[in-house]
């Protein structure tokens, strides 16, 4: 059993896992070579209502609490609408109370299989369901959780995204997490065509609050950045068993499919700035409706992120960071007013700031992707 360790203490340890997430080019992305996602900034959004009664975590989604709320939009390809739609439907729901953040999901699947049973193994080597949570939306200190159809868990904390050098802390646990799976079919039996598998997760706020604003669970009306991913491998049936399909030319496994709630524009889940917005409502599910409201500062933060991408590209070509919009190939406009934008650089660092929409404060971004307001 692993000890509970504070997020700050974990970050200071040397227990890091330099893993590659889902063959998502992490090992090939160096700190100063950051691909820019090719999509319009339009993350998913969801109202997470409270549940009046605790959820029984058994994978069965027939409880009244789940019936009272809407599904997320159906998952799409990780790269967005330019790619083919997923073959099978995936969707999720969310609830919360004073103790847990609840997640459920439904994954259509005619061939349900799993192999991994040991916690904290690399679960995406199986078909899996994944949760990513950035409580304060600064793209640092965020959580990742994965599970397969056996309910085998893998949880880790990332001090930074892989593009900015990580690290991933595999020694961190969501202690007290509960998971449940219900299989509509049979696991690892190609003789039967399956229907789907459903899952439930209860994550304790006592753990999730470690990286949250004020080290607390969300207040009503607060928004966290969250995304979901599904890994789906193509398989064949060989000698009565499911086997990952191989490229006939190379003999290697074909790349996995990545289907997500909020598209990333690249085959890379570790772009927290593109995750969805989940707004936590103080209303109990079924007692009324709440409107989702996007914070206008999110546009400011996205405009800074676009400059971050360009700075990384500029550095990769020139060995230094740009000191002006002109060097970055960006025209001054209402988003990048020369009189309001500030760019400060050293030999290997930069900081860019833009005014927030209120309170005479500014948003800032730096070379490792951290976003903050002061």
Image (cartoon, grey):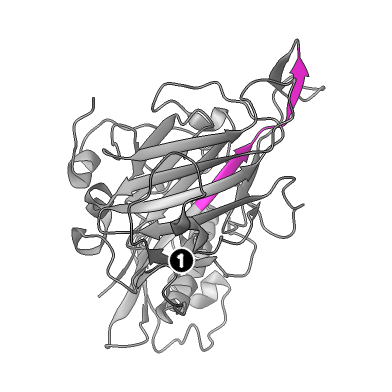
Q: Report which quarter residue 183 is drawn in.
A: top right
Instruction: Give the overall secondary structure of the magenta segment.
Output: strand
Q: Tell me residue 233's x, y (percent).
A: 67, 32
Side of 148 where 170 appears, left or right: left
Side of 98 where 267 appears, left or right: right
Which residue extends farthest right? 248
Q: Secondary structure at mark 1?
A: strand
Q: With respect to residue 256, does 1 lie above or below?
A: above
368 and 116: which is toward the camera: 116
How many numbered circles are shown?
Answer: 1
Q: Residue at x 49, y 59 (%)?
A: 275
Q: With respect to residue 106, does 149 lie above or below?
A: above
Which residue extends farthest top? 239
Q: Tell me residue 89's x, y (percent).
A: 68, 49
Q: Residue at x 58, y 43 (%)?
A: 230
Q: Residue at x 27, y 39 (%)?
A: 176
- Quick check: is 232 in the magenta stretch? yes
User: Circle 1: is it few (<14), some (14-19), or many (20+) Cα within 10 Å?
Assistant: many
Q: Report which quarter residue 187 is drawn in.
A: top right
Quarter of the image where the N terminus is located: top left
Q: Report which quarter residue 36 is drawn in.
A: bottom right
67 and 81: which is toward the camera: 67
Quarter of the image where the C terminus is located: bottom left
Side of 75 where 326 appears, left or right: left
268 and 295: which is toward the camera: 295
The region drawn magenta spans: 228-238
Is residue 251 among the parts visible in the rendering? yes
Q: Tell me residue 223's x, y (percent).
A: 38, 68
**Residue that badge 1 annotates:** 277
Is residue 159 among the parts visible in the rendering? no
- Quick check: is 214 in the magenta stretch? no
């Amino acid at each position: 059993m692993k000890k509970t360790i504070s997020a700050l203490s974990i970050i200071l340890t040397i227990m890091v896992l330099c893993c590659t997430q889902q063959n998502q080019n992490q090992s090939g992305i160096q700190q100063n070579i950051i691909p820019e996602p090719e999509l319009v900034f339009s993350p998913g959004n969801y109202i997470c209502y409270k549940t009046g009664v605790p959820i029984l975590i058994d994978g069965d989604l027939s409880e009244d609490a789940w019936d009272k709320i809407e599904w997320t939009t159906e998952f799409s390809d990780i790269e967005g609408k330019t790619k083919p739609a997923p073959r099978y439907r995936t969707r999720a729901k969310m609830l919360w109370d004073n103790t847990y953040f609840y997640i459920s999901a439904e994954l259509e699947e005619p061939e349900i299989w799993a192999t991994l049973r040991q916690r904290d193994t690399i679960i995406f080597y199986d078909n899996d369901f994944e949760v990513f949570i950035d409580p304060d939306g600064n793209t640092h200190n965020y959580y990742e959780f994965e599970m397969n159809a056996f309910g085998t868990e893998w949880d880790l904390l990332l001090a930074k995204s892989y593009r900015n050098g990580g690290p991933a802390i595999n020694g961190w646990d969501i202690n007290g997490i509960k998971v449940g799976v219900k299989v509509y079919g049979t696991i690892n039996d190609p003789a039967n065509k399956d229907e789907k598998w459903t899952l439930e997760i209860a994550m304790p706020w006592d753990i999730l609050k470690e990286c949250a604003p004020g080290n607390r669970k969300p207040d009503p009306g607060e928004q966290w950045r969250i995304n979901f991913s599904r890994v789906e491998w193509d398989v064949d049936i060989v000698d009565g068993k499911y086997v990952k399909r191989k490229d006939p030319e190379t003999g290697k496994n074909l790349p996995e499919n990545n289907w997500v709630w909020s598209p990333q524009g690249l085959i890379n889940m570790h772009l927290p700035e593109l995750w969805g917005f989940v707004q936590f409502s103080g209303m109990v599910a079924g007692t009324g409706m709440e409107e989702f409201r996007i914070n206008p500062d999110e546009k400011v933060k996205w405009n800074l992120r676009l400059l971050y991408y360009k700075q990384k590209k500029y550095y990769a070509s020139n060995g230094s960071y740009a000191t002006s919009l002109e060097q970055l190939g960006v025209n001054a406009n209402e988003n990048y007013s020369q009189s309001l934008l500030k760019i400060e650089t050293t030999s290997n660092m930069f900081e860019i700031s833009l005014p927030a929409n209120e309170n005479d404060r500014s948003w800032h971004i730096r070379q490792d992707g951290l976003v903050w307001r002061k």
